[in-house]
Image: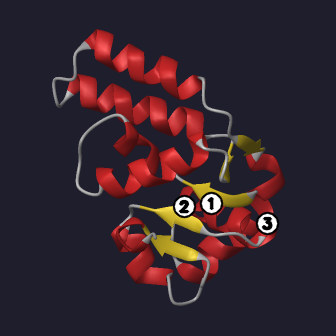
Amino acid sequence: MKEMVIDSSVVIKWFVVEPYSTEAQRILKQYQKGSISLLAPDFINAEVGNIVWKKHRIQNLKAEDAQQIIDTFRTLDFTLTSTADLLDHAYRLAVVHQRTVYDMLYVALSVREQCPFVTADEKLVNAIGRKFTNMVWIAEWK
């Protein structure tokens, strides 16, 4: 089974229609068929929760819809890695590449596991994607 690191910018597109939701749905379908295994730092739970909260608070996502997203997300079987295990590497990457430690936790996991990191964060890909060949912008995911 192929492994893939994904971040919350991809996950949220499974539940809320946004640009590149179709591409994100392809990843979800591959996961559901058992073709890929999803990896992430353990704080993806807090990130997804925070995005859903913002969409509820700012973009008028109904409370019951927000809760349904959280409930459904929690049923997904990610292989989670402790941020404590990734922190040293992520911090060094953040300093070198002038990006947030949050973003570099995903990069560090991808580097450690030698697998793709798919993100919908185009700014991140534009900033460091050439230096990390495993990083894939969702629009280019096949």
Query: Dividing the picture into quarters, in which one does residue 123 lie?
Result: bottom left
User: Quick check: marks 1 and 2 in contact, CB under 8 Å?
Assistant: yes
* Residue type at numbered disc 3: Glu
**Does residue 108 lie above or below 98 as drawn?**
above
**Identity of the residue furthest to the top in this view:** 64
Residue at the (49%, 73%) spot, across then down: 136
Residue picked out by circle 1: 106
Dot 3 or dot 2: first in sequence order is: 2
Decide which of tag 1 and tag 3 comes sooner along the chain: 1
Residue topped by disc 3: 113
Residue closest to the eye, 128 or 93: 128
Relative placement, left or right, of 36 versus 72 is right
Q: CA distance from mark 1 to mark 3?
A: 11 Å
Residue located 62% across and 60% down the image = 106
Residue at figure coordinates x 34%, y 69% from the top left: 139
Q: How is the image coloured?
A: secondary structure
CA gap between label 3 and label 2 equals: 16 Å
Name the residue furthest bottom.
130
Which dot, 3 or 2, sits closer to the camera? Answer: 3
Mark carried by residue 103: 2
Q: Position of residue 135 (x, y in %)?
A: 55, 75
Mark 2 is surrounded, within 10 Å at the Cα level, by few (under 14), some (14 to 19) or many (20 or more) other residues, namely some
5 to 128, vertically: above or below: above
Identity of the amino acid at label 2? Asp
Q: Which of 87 and 12 lies nearest the eye of the viewer?
A: 12
Q: Residues within 10 Å of mark 3 (few under 14, many from 20)?
A: some
